[in-house]
Amino acid sequence: MGAEKAFQALATQLHGADDRTLLKLVAVVDQLAKRGSLDQLLDEHRARLAVIRPPRPMTLGRLVVLPLEELLIDGAEWTPGMTRVPRDRLGRLIELVLEAIDPDLRRGAASQLAGKSMHDSALALDVGREIWPAAGLAADAILARGRQTRDTELRELLTPLRIMQNLMPVAESLVTTIWSLPDRPMLALEPAGRARIGALLALASAQGRDCFLLTAELLVARTELPLAIIEAVLDGELELADRERQQASAMIAEACQNEMVRLFRSVSLLPAGTGPSALVGPLRTLVANLESLQEVAQKVKFDHRELRRLKAEVFTLIEARLEASLGGALLHAFGALDDDTKSADCRALEAHAMAAANMRLMAKRIGLATKIDFVFAKALERFRAILEEAAGPGAGPMGATMDRIRIIELLFDSRSAMQSLTRLRQLAHAARAREPA
Amino acid sequence: MARDDRQHRHLDLAERSVGLPFTTPLISGAKARLVATGGVELLAPNPSGQLGYYVMDLRSLRDYCQLTVHDELLLEKLLGVDVVTPATVRRAAREVAMEGAAGRDAAAAAKRAAERDAAIVNLTNYLMLMRLLRAVGIDERELQRSGGTGRAVQLEIKRRLTSLSPRLGMTADEVIDTVGDIAFYAAAIGFADGELETRHRRVLERLSPFAADMRHWAALETGESKECAEQIADCAGWTSNKVAPLIADCQVRLEDIPELVRAWRHDRGALKGRFALPDWLLDGWPEILALWDSASGDGRAAQRAVAAQIQRLMPLAQTQAEGRSVEVMRVKGTMVHSRLVKLHEDWRTGVVMGGIRARTEALRAGVA
């Protein structure tokens, strides 16, 4: 089998793989010295891998980039100059940095990591304390010669190298702070979390402006709560004057807003038939950031008109996608449910329903609640009509009916679902009463 | 009083509560307990997430919060049962799950669990009858050699038991009924030399390792989280230490079936209580163990949240002994919790409607 065919076969296998098989395949890929395009294959499954958390072997390369993890993005999304690290260039970046580290230190660290997994956080910190400062110095040295180079590959790595150069001096604090934060999505940060972020920003500000701004950007990416970061910048004990604090906050807000505009454009371009489950993640990020930015709007100077425009556009997008989904794919799948429907399909439909309900709540936060409630009220009538028709005389057993009740519950609410169930019981009772004795 | 005794002083069944497997996040971890007047009280964890429970009549639950369809159906069943015990709650919950109210996976798991339990009860019943015959000098292998149908074997057992009636002081039918009654409780306990993986044995075997794991995990924690994990580990260790001898005592009684049958007939209440006690003490632990398993691959932050959720599921007696309050709350028909509405409408976590509920349903499927 040619390499191309083998690649395709693996891609197909990954797509249909259950969690256990996916973990096995990832373990095989992790064993390879040269991963190349295999990393691209895994990129498509990163969201799933983040949930099932395979134990990844701890390697020196993985440890070096651990502090930058929140800034990693898909290669396709990255453009030179963007303060993010593209995954598809990570291999080369690690290679360059490790080459520039003292070989004895490198070998010693590698031998400590042998056979360990990334779950061993104590070891990661122990070895990281030695390797991160060295990686920062290595990035510094490569940057010095890289600025004059004509090597395009190296030139494209200048921004990731600059990120590494600036963040490595605060790497330990960065990693421990990130670990201490609650998992995504975060509703709000507790005082202890804010204090830890404040301490990290103070440490970063003492390292210089670039380190401070990159740390702030990384924290925004991790928390998706610019408010928490901007508050820490405005009120924290930092080595920054008031004016600089204002400037830094405005930069964070502006950067966040630009990121939201970019995200909005990419979501708008998704095909019309994209299901709610695929939309809900990016929309959640969009709405959370819009709300967060709105809260700091009074304290920080940035383009408020752009913020309002973006809010209106996001609302319109959610409304249109919900209308299409409730009257199209979701309704159709709801009608097609029967006892032969596979459990996996049933679960997928439930996930779509849950995502659509979530989108409704998002829309209510940034737009007219009555408008979005009207969309759902009309949809409920259509869903109920299908339910009653399918559960009518001569219909199949209760199984699919209960599946439909669950979908109504997830999509609308449990009150609507109970009303539907009560109505079905009344209809069944009336039908029995009409039967001849 | 030693710390361990102080923490776990409530052993009386009347004081113990039964965990209710609700899927509505606000009442996840709620418990029911009998009251002197004959009604059933619901103890719902403080909705603010702070310490303490709210106590209300089970019938007022619908006024307290909007229930999921699963919980509406479960409540209907619970209001119809004569006595609230771990066994009756388990049966009601299984029936609701089998209707599909907690999803297809939970329905299939509940069906499998009901079939497995029924098979174990039948097998225990049969083995007890065989032991009874052996104890009075009848070679049960003759019955097995006869090769008849189940019905034929039953009739043969009955015929042979008739000859024992004077010795046991009861008719053959009474003996068979009593053995059947005991088998219902003994099935979860099993015989001392039995190889059957009974429900209690399955849970008990995991309690001590779980306590050790929790202590190990707590070693890297600080503050409230550490305290919470240590309490859970203490409670698991205590439960294991208490339940093991209780089960051993029941197994000793199962060694002498004729005597057990006679004693059961004479004082059913006391013996039934003794055989049912492990079920009360182990109530809620399968869910706790499954919950901790489900978080095994998660990060520390997620595990901390799960530990807090486990604390809500711990036996109420433990919670009270820790000095936490049980507040009586009068529930009115018009009551609306602003916090509930906010949580219910929270789109950013999606957790209230989605995550927590889905996790609870998945757990239900796992521990049906």
Image (tube, coloured by chain):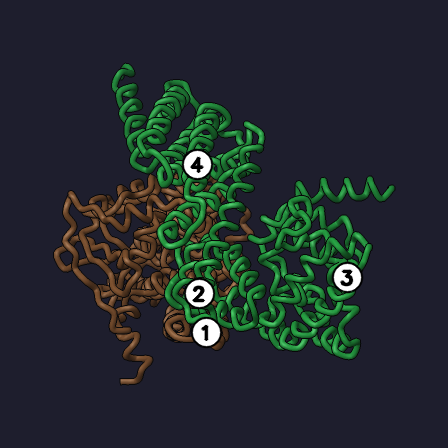
Chain colours: A green, B brown
Q: Earlier in the sequence, mark 3 or mark 4?
A: 3
CB within 8 Å, label 2 to label 4? no
Q: Residue furthest bottom?
A: B1
Type of the residue with mark 4: Arg
Q: Is residue A22 visible?
A: yes
Residue denoted by label 2: B304
Residue denoted by label 3: A146
Name which residue lies at 33% across and 27% down: A374
Per the image, label 4 sits on a secondary structure element best described as: helix
Per the image, label 2 sits on a secondary structure element best described as: helix
Type of the residue with mark 1: Glu
Q: Could you tell whether B344 is left or right of A201 in the image?
A: left
Q: CA distance from mark 1 to mark 4?
A: 46 Å
Q: Residue furthest right?
A: A2
Discs 1 and 4 share one subunit: no
Q: Earlier in the sequence, mark 1 or mark 2?
A: 1
CB within 8 Å, label 1 to label 2? yes
- Give the chain letter at badge 4: A
Q: CA distance from mark 3 to mark 4?
A: 41 Å
- Residue B3: x, y in percent? 31, 82
